[in-house]
Amino acid sequence: MITNDIEKVMNQWLDTDCLHKDEIVVIGCSTSEVAGHPIGTSGSTRIAKNIYEQLAKLQKQTGVHLAFQCCEHLNRSLVVERQTAVRYGLEEVAVVPVPEAGGSMASYAYKQMENPVVVENISAHAGIDIGETMIGMHLKAVAVPLKLEQRTIGHARIRAARTRPKLIGGHRAFYGENPSR
């Protein structure tokens, strides 16, 4: 059931055509919520693995950079590949996420990445929140909700968003043919 839900979400997200090469996508995920338990109570490496595998496919298809949000015990810091941190000038912090401090998803992602680092902040172009983990602090200033048909993964509610540049200048300003991008 969970794998089927994840596949549906990933396909619907791809259909929005809002994920672009070299953009950052933040992922917040409570594997406890996916399993039907309160956030932070029943983390699951198995669920993290299922979700990570689908996100890795999404990354391969789109060329985005993935950033996995840790839990509040690590101040919602993020796991990224070192090349992502260097490319975007992100400051590394000294911590390694574990299931008890960082969460099952972030700790699993850390172990799967080629050269992972943890950074404190990010301004992502898009994101998905699986289980109400509060990713908003890591999205660029103008977040636009995506209305995906698949609204849950397992028992966890999901919310996805893309971002767009701020529209400035008032009624005289010209924003081009496609102001949402």
Image (spheres, rainbow, N blue to C red):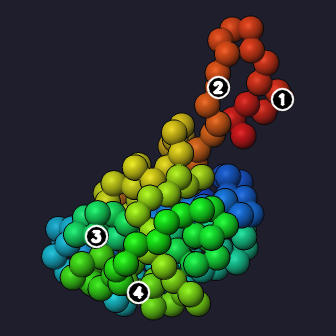
SS of the residue at dot 2? loop
Q: Which residue is mark 4?
A: 108
Give above or below for 172 relative to 82: above
Q: Say if mark 1 contacts mark 2, CB within 8 Å.
A: no
Label 2 Cα neighbours within 10 Å, binned few <14 / some 14-19 / many ≥20: few
Q: Is residue 57 left or right of residue 113?
A: right
Ranked by sequence position, the earlier of labels 4 and 1 is: 4
Residue type at numbered disc 4: Tyr
Label 4 vs label 1: CA separation? 42 Å
| Mark 3 or mark 1, earlier in chain | 3
Please tell me which residue is depicted at 67% across the width and 16% down the height of the picture: 169
Residue identified by numbered label 3 = 74
**C-alpha separation, residue under disc 1 versus residue under disc 2:** 13 Å
Task: Quote the CA–CA distance across marks 4 and 2.
Answer: 38 Å
Q: Amino acid at mark 3?
A: Leu
Task: Tell me where residue 109 appears, x and y as whole percent.
Answer: 46, 83
Instruction: Kindly report which numbered mark, 1 or 2, lies closer to the viewer in this rendering.
Output: 2
The residue singled out by tag 2 in the image is 167
**Measured Cα–Cα span from mark 2 to mark 3:** 34 Å
- Expressed as whole percent of the image width and height from the top left, the position of residue 114 reads 58, 90
